[in-house]
Amino acid sequence: MIINHPILGPRDSQEFTYLGDASLIDRPDWQAEDAADQFHDYLYLRDNPAGEHRELWFHEQGDRSWLVVTRNTVTHEILTVELARDVARARGRSK
Amino acid sequence: MTDAVMNAGAMAFRADGSNGARKGAQVNRLDGGLINGARKLGFTFDGTRYEGHEGDTLASALLANGVRLMGRSFKYHRPRGVLTSGSEEPNALVELRSGGRQEPNTRATVAELYDGLEANSQNRWPSLQHDFMAINDRFSNFLTAGFYYKTFMWPAAFWEKVYEPIIRKAAGLGSISFEADPDAYDKGFLHCDLLVIGAGPTGLMAALTAGRAGAQVIIADEDFLLGGRLNAETFGIGDLTGAAWGAQVQAELAAMPNVRVMPRTTIIGAFDHGIYGAVERVADHVLAPEAGKPRQILWRIYSKRAMLAAGATERPIAFENNDRPGVMLAGAVRAYANRWAVTPDQTVAVFTNNDDGHRTAADLIAKGVKVTAVIDTRTDAPKVEGAELLAGARVIDTKGRLGLEVAQVRLADGTTRDVPCGALAVSGGWNPNVHLTCHQRGRPAWREDIAAFVPAGELPQNMSVAGAANGDFSTAAALRAGAEGAVAALSELGIEAKASDLPEAEDAPVNVTPFWYVKEGKGRAWLDQQNDVTVKDVKLAHQENFRSVEHLKRYTTLGMATDQGKTSNMGGLAIMAELAGKQIPEVGTTMFRPPYTPVSFGVMAGRSVGEEFRPTRKTPSHKWAEEQGAVFVEVGQWLRAQWFPKAGETHWRQSVDREVLQTRNSVGICDVTTLGKIDVQGKDAAEFLNMMYANAFAKLPVGKVRYGLMLREDGIAYDDGTAARFAEDHFVVTTTTANAVLVYRNMEFARQCLFPDMDVQLISTTEAWAQFAVAGPNARKLLQKVVDPEFDISNEAFPFMGCGEVTVAGGCRARLFRISFSGELAYEIAVPTRYGDAMIRKLMEAGEEFGAVPYGTEALGVMRIEKGHAAGNELNGTTSALNLGMGRMVSKKKDCIGNVLSERPGMNQDDALKLVGFRPVNAGDPVQAGAHLMNADGEVSAATDQGYITSAAYSPVLGCSIGIGFLKRGDARLGEVIRAVNPLEGKETRVEVVSAHFVDPEGERLRG
């Protein structure tokens, strides 16, 4: 596969390490009342769609960017590639 | 360019009309052809010497010498000859070369002949003519489809010891020499606008069109001679013969700098996003690769567009005893005659259901070969010049010992006639080579007019299909499709190309009436000759309700051999359709997977063999350690010194005990560079580390080091190390050797994905610093001789868990950490890697007066067990901070990775495992790592399990074997005697539960 890195352009997927669902960005609040339940869902519950999937890839053999890659799991078509940091900020994460 | 020159040479002897091939031993050699008659090549087959010519394949040369018998079948050991003239060959599998270069299961049809080629038949004993295992054929009733599943069911224990070895010995796999392959294999990367797969008329026209438009083009073909069927047919293109036109186009392509012509290159797979795998056979056609050149190259081709122009494969008709050597595909017989100037026999008959089969008769007659009959299943078959036509007839059986002599024919009027022939050219129609279109999601569709599957469904991204591969079988249609396909593909890339005037070429329609198998006869009619699958087997599968094509395939093994059923699948599923009363499209077809043809392990491995299998990382003191005669051990990719034997030491324990005792009594030095090092900087560095570690770091003072434990988000401990604060905004973190990469990855994840606005930067500095542990009561005295005098490293100025930047040896920058893994007064000192070698020499020199010893990973391990420090065995992916005795370290006042889930009740039960130490009750007993712990009395079972020992060693300090491990409520059971059991070896040792800190439990030495 070829991943079109937002900074470096098209790179072979061999340069990357795959992590999993991009929902891992949404780490729950540790002080929430139901923190244990939230962390359970965060860590163990995943959708497994046949189709579009937002997922985290790490450019380990490259610039060490974490990317959010939107990929069709059926066709392997890659629809968008974003810097995970931008996605995280857009989802309200900061410090 | 070399290919163009070569081909221009080939043209030269074609032009003069005679290749000068002498008839002699080559009894079946004809005139003409695309071989170099002036250049003879000697080769051996099963030890017999033969001669062939440049341009021959092993198969064509054997046929020229009158050899029809080339192999034995997989299961029944039936004598088999060559069926095809290409890579789809199921029968003529041979071993090439010998010694380290021996290669089994290669197809004689694509083995390019060279002087000195050594080939042997396989799967026969003692000889190809007299094969003892042919007895299997007599027992064929017991060896039908599914026989593995039915016959070898009982007793279960017999499978591994009895059945499998016998089957393996009997089944038709070639052998290997077990010698190392002396040749190199390479990998490479190529990029292009248009990849053209196949260099027949379609591919050549496409490449020419694209090449002339200036596009970056790669054209690859598995054959050594480009042209595809043009080389096997007699019809012309424009004013030239097909072969001459092909050579002309190839010469033009070779002269274009933007075109890469790749003969002997098989595209083996279509992968995601326009990536193709290709195997180039650089040196399989010569005795040995040129010095420095690889035998084969595995290319990864990145294409913007690809055109599949892979042509078509002829399919046989099944009839009784259709596997007798001499029964061949009609197109192959024609190819041998036209391209290689060879006939399999002087008398040939043709059996066909389509017009294309008639071409074989016409071409053979033109070459002076006697065609005894053209047997056509169609009653309205066209006339044949120069041979008898038997219309509406079919071959019902064959006869002949070790080769065809007679074809028995049922005529239209129901009578039977014996047709004498040494070869029977069979054509059941042609199947487009759709394989690569299926490598992702393509699902071929049936086309009634040509009675074949054509590419359909979702093709690999940016792939188009043209020519015979797409069901356009005439040469004119192929040329047109190639040109137009190239124009269309390039226009998508914004490259303007013109389909120039196409040369005149034959444009015959496809006239075929499907005919899959002859129903007469009680014997066996072969479908898949490589896996010995017959029409009967398909019927059996149907009868036993294995009716879907995927079940049919797996139950009968149809199409599961190395040829992936290129000549057999179609027949099998057509018969299944008939039996099930369905249309072929309803039954569908099985999928094809990469590789298109078999690929050697060598080229897959490439250069990653032997020592180069993976990178080897050497520590900065490696050279010095080698000089000391160190014994090394692999730790991941690292090579670390395991121990340093001294003269007179005959057992590793002697070396290790000495290293431990001398370190504890005076001073020892160990290279710890392999530990991961991560530089953490930024205003929020402390806050960031607070999140990474279970314990608190925010308030760590500058100039101090703290031990830290890292958890996974599920609360399990996964790594530990230290973080040293060099400035308010600067930490140096160490990780274990094994997790250096993972910790860094996780920290980057937290930095970018969880805390994107934290001001913190990370960089891996593992390889930037050479780091040495200096441990033992004399460690400080030693270091005071090395660290420059302006730095005060006295106990008061530089206490336990201190850190700082110093200089050594008169100004060399260094970092000093007062940390201890051994439990002794100890330091770690780091210098830039390039000074690592000098540093170890300096330290050893300074340590001479103290009798300083270097120690390796074994002594390191013994000392950390004596001290009760956790390592990889304890951080084993199942243990929590609580288990490790660090439960109180996990800060409840702050968030950190793993904090919330480490609170789960299940991980915090009263009987949780706790890390403790174990001493044998009888001092001489060994403590074994991996042993499970049981109460002093009672049964030994999983239900009564109390825990397990994770690490054990002989402690030279205590003079006995010791261990540490996890015991239920271990911290409350000190002094209890329990049993460490090893049911696998029947061992049981009584051990006393003790503190894991065997040496200096109060930590006085550390602080001294």
Image (cartoon, rainbow, N blue to C red):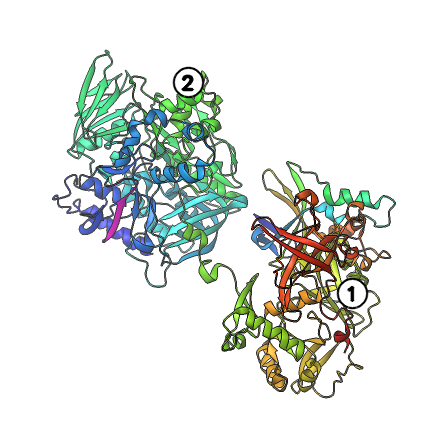
User: From which residue to which does the magenta span run?
Assistant: B116-126
Who's the residue at 24% across and 26% down the image? B350
- Which circle's residue, 1 or 2, is located before the other in the chain? 2
Query: Which residue position holds label 1?
Result: B685
Name the spot of residue B93 as percent of width and height, x first. Answer: 31, 41
Q: Nearer the viewer, residue B462 or B754?
A: B754
Q: Where residue B190 sits: x, y (%)?
A: 47, 53
Q: Give the number of the disc on residue B578.
A: 2
> Farthest residue in the top direction?
B413
Residue B339 vertical placement versus B362 (above, below) = below
Task: Answer few, some or many: residues within 10 Å of disc 2's Cα (few below 14, many 20 plus, some between 14 and 19).
Answer: few
Q: Quadrant of the C terminus of chain B?
A: bottom right
Going by the image, does B779 lie left or right of A35?
Answer: left
Let me know if residue B459 is in the magenta part. no
Q: Mark 1: give few (<14), some (14-19) or many (20+) Cα within 10 Å.
A: many
**Amino acid on which disc 2 is placed:** Glu
